[in-house]
Image: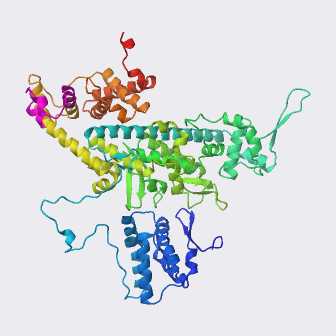
Amino acid sequence: MKNGEHQLRIESEAGACRHINIHYLSHVKDWEPFAQHAVNYCTGKKPISIKSWWSRLNSVLRPTITDSEMKAFPKKADDWSTLIKNLYLTTLITPEIKSSITTRVAIWNKNLLPFLVYLQDRDQIPISVLIPAMKQVNQVQKESSFNVSIIGEKAAYKVNNKDQIDKLICPVSLSRTDSEYLDELYYDLERKRNRLHQALTDYWKTLKAFFEDGQKLINEIDLASLERRVKAKDFYDIYPREKGTPPIRRHFSSGHNRKSFAAYLLLSKKYKGFIKLSSKIEDCGLASRTVMWENKSLWMSHTPPSHIEKDKIGYTGKLNWMLGILGNMDVSFIVALLMMENPKFTFLSLLNCKVEDKHGKSRLEIGETSISFMIEKSRAKAFKKEGLSDLSLEIISTLLEMRTANLANLPTNLSKYLFVILAMNSKDKDFTCAQGSRVTAYLTGRTEGSLFIGSLFPSLADAGISRNQITHSKLRASEGVLEYFRTGSIRAVSRKLGNGTRVALEHYLPKPLIAAYNTRQVRRFQNLMLVSACANEDYLLDAVDFSNLNELHSFILEMLALDSKGNNPLISYLKDKIDETRERHQGDLIANISERSLSLLYAYKLIAENNNIGASTLAQKDSKTGLAPISFITLAKHLNTTLSQHNESSVRETNFSAKNKALLMAEKLEWDQLIMRRANIS
């Protein structure tokens, strides 16, 4: 019983408790045996699965009991048949389930039906009672007239009123199938991803800087001397002043200087394990909230600068950072950043990640050539090992340092987890595991006016990232689509995400996107074949589907850049026809390009991204040349991909140097400064 109502208590592996209200069952006679069977049915399931199953059961059983005014659970076969019919109907029509008809069918077949069969196997439901499975949407029976088709008849198609797919951080339009849209989508998706990645990185840099400075302060002071003062109730320091002026008395942990601030941090860690300002001077020697606020400007001068654009983090939160104590918002942003760096890691696998396996071996493995981290993907029932980037290694190493620094204060059942947060609103515990729903809210901004990533980084709105637009799952799916744009390979996407090709196709790559990409590939092959066959003919432009020579010339240059290694026989044939006298070596590029030209091209792309120029603006073509700015950006991406993987180290070094110079140029220039004016020319 809780608050006078019957509730089911579910305890997670980390010790966090959740309650599910089942008080409605108590109004029905003989409800206890039914509830006990439901509890037994969930034996062996994970806590999160138990919670989900009970939620689905309640969403159907509660309205069924209410609408039918059921007084007792049935005993006879006819009564059970009536109840099952009502449950079947309620599953399809109840407003308590906010799901499509397909999901409602799945709820019956995968949740309610197996439980009813379970009851029947234990003689709770008579064997004569029929428990029907629910047919899938569009399912037809054998020998049905729906299977009959007429020769020449067009296949039926599903009508979808939505004009876009929202599985990515950038919506995919279903109304555009032209090949130019792929370049626009690629640019917008990468631009938003990079801007969000930068914001999350800046947040992490701020958090890490506070933790490092806090540890330095703590290491500067002797704990034993502080404990002696606390034991002796010697809480004040006396500071003499000029003759005739009384001395100043200051609390020794009030933060009025560096040593005093360090004392406050160390005493909080020793006696509490976290920072929580009190309204009065505490017995453990901690100054009151009033005194700390009075000295706020003094102790804040010993904290590092913030990289957050609009810093709305509370002072208590920042003080806890200095001890290595995190909150739900911190976990939300750190998990998002780790998922972008390592898309094999899913949201739940990171949230519930443990730092050691069952044998006590660390899951952070340092090899001769790489450093990897292993996590458990419970849904896939597998472990995934991922090589870590420099940023990922920095994050996980720092999280492990935070864990070590606070290990003495953590409960035993929580000490094995990577993410342990401060239990802000709990009276019976100080620490808990991060709560999934609260963690996601800080990235998504689910409630209007609530704090989320866009509140801390308003510039994200200029990049087109707003409230209720991004989720952790969308970040991972976006990384997969970006890999598809870079490689054109579904296998590369499955390797990137750590899933099979079937899962990558079904859940992460939008079908309209693949169709548009395949259409462009077919058109490219057709045009390339025609260009190769008619290379030196006068009617070349008429043979292909380009409107002018500039478009044709851009197409040829793009094809040559994509095949720098000379693997495509059609492109090799085209090279021979264009320049039969030139001696060709495998691996040669068709044109020379200087480091300065590369720098300018890369800077052009960076400036467009930094100024949040939308793809629709960049796709506008010049009336005279027929070229659009996005063509140069696409070329920059192709060149970077090709040159960064070139066989010759000198080419790779030149490309690396060009990108560094481009970064410097992009910091000094704005988009409108790239527009050529007569005054600039003369």
- Residue 634 in the image, given as x and y percentages of width and height: 30, 33
Residue 400 visible somewhere in the drawing: no
Q: Quadrant of the C terminus?
A: top left
Q: Residue at x 37, y 41 (%)?
A: 189
Q: Is residue 28 left or right of residue 217?
A: left
Q: How many marks?
A: 0
Q: Position of residue 573 (x, y in %)?
A: 10, 32
Q: Position of residue 248 (x, y in %)?
A: 84, 34
Q: Answer with left or right where residue 661 lies relative to residue 421.
A: left
What is the chief secondary structure element of the magenta stretch?
helix
Instruction: Confirm whether the magenta stretch covers residue 614.
Output: no
Which sits in the foreground, 21 or 540?
540
* Residue 592 sits in quarter: top left
Q: Is residue 496 left or right of residue 48?
A: left
Where residue 576 appears, as percent x and y from the top left, is 10, 28
Q: Which region of the structure is painted magenta?
A: 529-556
Does residue 675 appear anywhere in the picture?
yes
Tell me which residue sits at (39%, 76%) in the image: 113
Quick check: 235 left or right of 463? right
- Front one among 91 and 577: 91
As drawn, the residue found furthest toward the top would be 682
Tell which residue pokes out farthest to the right in this image. Answer: 244
**Observer-nearest residue: 652 or 522?**
522
